[in-house]
Image (cartoon, rainbow, N blue to C red):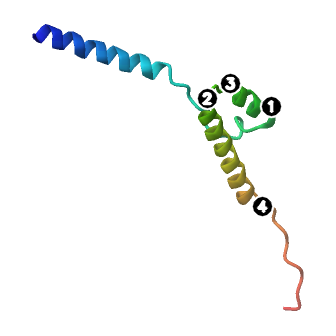
């Protein structure tokens, strides 16, 4: 009886490991991955629609954050102080 339980536990463990290996990983939204050429390449490499949507949303958020943090120093106008 113990050997059957052990065999079942090993089989379940192997199945979980194989299922984890086949999972498609979504690229992290970085400046390099969200650049025009790389963005299209990464997007086309994703086969699941949910993963594509996750990558698109991640790049949109990344680009919005980049635009918010970019600023240009403008000297204040000279005043009569």
Instruction: Quote the CA–CA distance across marks 3 and 2.
Output: 9 Å
Q: Which residue is mark 3?
A: 45
Please provide percent x and percent y for residue 14: 34, 14
Quote the CA–CA distance across marks 4 and 2: 37 Å
Query: Residue drawn 75% across and 55% down?
Result: 67
Residue in front for this viewpoint, 53 or 21: 53
| Residues at marks 1 and 4, CA–CA distance in whole angstroms | 25 Å
- Establish if 80 lies above or below 46: below
Q: CA distance from mark 3 to mark 4?
A: 34 Å
Near mark 3 (Cα within 10 A), the count class, few <14, some 14-19 or many ≥20, is: few
Left or right: 64, with 12 as reference point:
right
Q: Earlier in the sequence, mark 3 or mark 4?
A: 3
Q: Which residue is mark 2?
A: 48
Q: Which residue is mark 4?
A: 71
Give the position of the C terminus as an image quadrant: bottom right
Q: Residue at x 10, y 10 (%)?
A: 1
Q: Secondary structure at mark 3?
A: helix
Q: Are marks 3 and 4 in contact (CB under 8 Å)?
A: no
Question: Above or below — where is 16 with respect to 40?
Answer: above
Depth check: 81 or 14 in front?
14
């Amino acid at each position: 009886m113990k050997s059957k339980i052990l065999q079942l536990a090993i089989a379940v463990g192997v199945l979980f490991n194989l299922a984890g290996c086949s999972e498609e990983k979504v690229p992290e939204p970085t400046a390099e991955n969200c650049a025009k050429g790389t963005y299209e390449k990464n997007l086309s490499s994703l086969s699941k629609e949910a993963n594509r949507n996750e990558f698109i949303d991640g790049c949109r958020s990344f680009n919005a954050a980049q635009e918010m943090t970019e600023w240009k120093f403008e000297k204040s106008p000279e005043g009569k102080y």
